Amino acid sequence: MKLIARTVAPAAVLVLAGLTATACAPQTSDNSAEKDDKSGTLRVWLFQEVGNKPKEKVVDEAVAAFRKAHKDTEVKVEYIPVETRAQRIKAAFNDPKSAPDVIEYGNTDTAGYVKDGGLADVSKEFDAWDEAQDLDPTATQSVTVADKIYGAPFFVGVRALYYRTDIFKELGIAPPKTQDELIATARKIHKSKPELYGLAVGGAYTYGAMPFIWANGGELAQKSGGSYKAAINSAAAQKGITAYTSLFGGDNCPAAKCASMGGNATVTAFASGKAAMAIGGDFSHQAVEAGAAKGKYAVVPLPGLKAGSIAPAFAGGNNIGVLKSSSHRTLAVDLMKQFTGKETQRKLFDAMGFLPTYTDVRSEVAKKEPFVAPFVTTLASGTKFVPASAGWGQIDAALVLPTMFQEIVSGKKDVAAASTDAAKKMDASFTAAG
C-alpha cells in the first residue's frame, strides 16, 4: 500500500518545553467546512525533528494502519520547521483551500489557535474514545479551552534534576531533598570547584524557573471571570522568584554568563562537563548521553520545599488537532486518534524517547527504560500548565518573564518591582486576548 510521497522541509530544532506562537495573524472568520467527505486525500503537517527518520517510520506505520480501515483514503504527510509554524499554521487558518486537515502543534499554542478559529471542537469524539480515559489529566488540560476539547495529546515532556554522581561522591554529598538544600548544594559545589556551575540556571529559562514559583505556592495567573489576571507578583510567587534568582551570582552561576542562558544552554553546560547540576527534560537524555557527562550522572525529581516533596513541573509537549476547515472531519478525527493512540505513543517513545501521555503506558516504558523513572515520578506527583489564554502566546513571545528574571539578576530592579511590571504586561496581553 503506497503512501503519497511526503515533502520534507529543512531540519529545525524542536524544543519540548511547550511551543508558543511567535507571530500574529488576523483573527479568522468562521471557516467551518460545509461537507464531510468519507474518502479522498488527507493532508497532514507534522513538526520536523532533529534526526527525523525515526519519527517518519512511526508515522508511516500509523498511516498504514489507518489506511487499512480507510481504503479509499490517501494520506499526504509534510514535515514543517518549528520556527515558522506560527506563520504557516495561521496562514492556513485564513486560507482553508490550502490548509491541511490535521496538524501537530505545541501544547501552549492551543488557546491562541482556538481564538484564531482554526481548530475543530472534537469534544464529542474525544469523550467517546475509550483510550482517552487513561490520559494524564494535565495532558487533557492542554487540549482544553473553555471546557471544550480541541485535539488529542501526542506526547509530554517534563523536567527533573540531573546531577554528576562522580562530583557528589568526591565531595561526600547526597542529592538534595529540599529546595533549600538544592541551593546550598549548588553553592557548596561551586565553592569547592570554582570552574563548575553548581547548578546551571538561565535568565531566559522560563520553564526551569516555574517549578520554584509553583513549589512556593505561587501561580503565573489566576482565572478571573472569563479571562486571566496575572499572579506573578503575589507574595508566594515573589518568594519563588527570589529562590530562583538567588542562584545567579558569583557563588553559583555568574549573572554575566548565566542571565542570557535558556534551557538548551543550561543542559549543554551540564552535558559538556561545565555544571554539576542542571534542570533538564526527559528529552535532554540523548544530549547528555552524547556529552562529557556520559556515564557520570543520575537524575532525581526536582525537590520541593519539604523533604520528600517534588516541585511541580511544567507539562510541555505537543498535540494533534483537526482543522475546522477540513472537508474530511470524520476521517481527520480518526487519523488524529491513530497518531495519538497508545500503540503509536509506545512506538514514538521507543523511536524518539518522547514520553507517552497515557499514565498506564508511561508506567510500562518506565519499567523498560530506567532513565524514565524520575520523570514519570515527577508527572505522577502533579504538574502544572500555562494559562489557557491566547494572551499567553503574546506573553511568551514578548519575553515578559525572561525580562523579569534578567532585570532582577542584573540588579536593575528588585523582585517586587520587576514582578509588578511583569504582571502589568501580562494583564495587558490577557485583556487584549479577551
Image: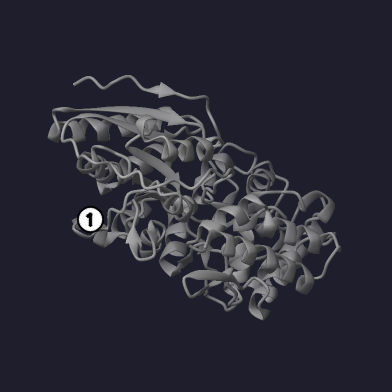
Q: Amino acid at mark 1?
A: Glu
The quadrant holding residue 56 is top left
As displayed, is residue 1 above or below residue 14?
above
Frontmost residue, 198 versus 118: 118
Q: Give the number of marks.
A: 1
Determine the residue positioned at 44% across, 45% down: 28
Left or right, 224 with reference to 209 = left
Tell me the crowding category of disc 1: few under 14, some 14 to 19, or many 20 or more residues within 10 angstroms, Cα based.
some
Residue 127 location (% of width, % of height): 23, 60
Quadrant that contains the N terminus: top left
Q: At numbered mark 1, what does the secondary structure look like: helix, strand or loop? A: helix
As displayed, is residue 337 above or below residue 245?
above
Residue 221 location (% of width, % of height): 57, 70
Determine the residue positioned at 50% across, 61% down: 389
Residue 352 location (% of width, % of height): 42, 39
Left or right, 324 with reference to 405 = left
Q: Say whether residue 152 is visible.
A: yes
The quadrant holding residue 220 is bottom right
**For mark 1, what is the residue?**
131
Determine the residue positioned at 70% across, 65% down: 422
Q: Say whether residue 163 is visible.
A: no
Determine the residue positioned at 63% across, 50% down: 397
Frontmost residue, 278 versus 73: 73
The quadrant holding residue 347 is top left
Frontmost residue, 410 versus 72: 72
Residue 2 location (% of width, % of height): 22, 19
